[in-house]
Image (cartoon, grey):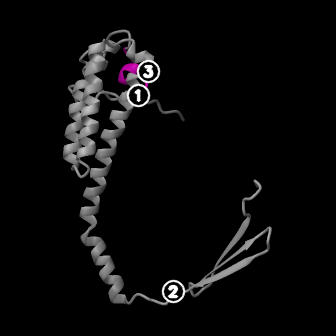
Amino acid sequence: MPRGQPQIDVTFDVDANGILKVSAVEKTTGKEANITITNDTRLSDADVERMVAEAERYKAEDEANRLRVEARNALENYAFSMRSSMNEEALASKLSEEEKANINDKIKEIMAWLDANQSAGKDECDAKQRELEAVINPIIQRASGVGADGSGGPAAGNSGGGFPGTAAPSGQGMDYEGPPIEEID
């Protein structure tokens, strides 16, 4: 332990009645402190039932909020992933300056939209992700040599165009099922 840093041992003890006892001892000086935390308030059966009813009532709202947050995070992660991919030489060397500018401008636009629309719903975030993919996917497909049917070119067999950070095209006329999965006994 570095000099001047206190070394403290803390002990927690909960008894059968739910009483928490905390003690701390500073090793170098031997100074000790104790505290006891009790639960003086008990919930009545009516309070418990009310809390359960509230949880059920807000369940749908909580689920909608979870889906909204997941959609927002997916959009943000996709935008950051594509921004990182644009800086990788494997992809950047295959794109023209105009294509790079188009992708970077769209990513900046989406990031600005995310900042300005903190409470945007799932559908709005999904629409923005499709909008971003509509700009990025065709450029990535051309750069990787993948045809509209998902095959052909030197990159055939590479999922997602073969570039790090790029995902397989989602739903734009592509029947991409991913790599084959073999079962091993």
Q: In this view of the protein, which residue sits in the foreground, 160 or 150?
A: 160
Instruction: Please tell me which of labels 3 and 2 falls first in the chain.
Output: 2
**107 lies above or below 15:** above
Question: What's the magenta region?
Answer: 156-164
| Residue 84 marker | 1
Residue for badge 3:
88
CB atoms at circles 3 and 1 under 8 Å apart? Answer: yes
Instruction: Please tell me which of labels 1 and 2 falls first in the chain.
Output: 2
Residue for badge 2:
39
Q: Say which quarter of the image contains residue 8.
A: bottom right
**Total marks placed:** 3
Identity of the residue drawn at 32% across and 83% down: 49
- Label 2 sits on what residue type? Asn
Q: How far apart are marks 1 and 2 (CA)?
A: 51 Å
Q: Position of residue 153 (x, y in %)?
A: 33, 9
| Residue 175 marker | none
Q: How far apart are marks 3 and 1 (CA)?
A: 7 Å
CB atoms at circles 1 and 2 under 8 Å apart? Answer: no
Q: Tag 2, which secondary structure?
A: loop
Residue 135 in magenta stretch: no
- Label 3 sits on what residue type? Glu
Q: Is residue 131 visible?
A: yes
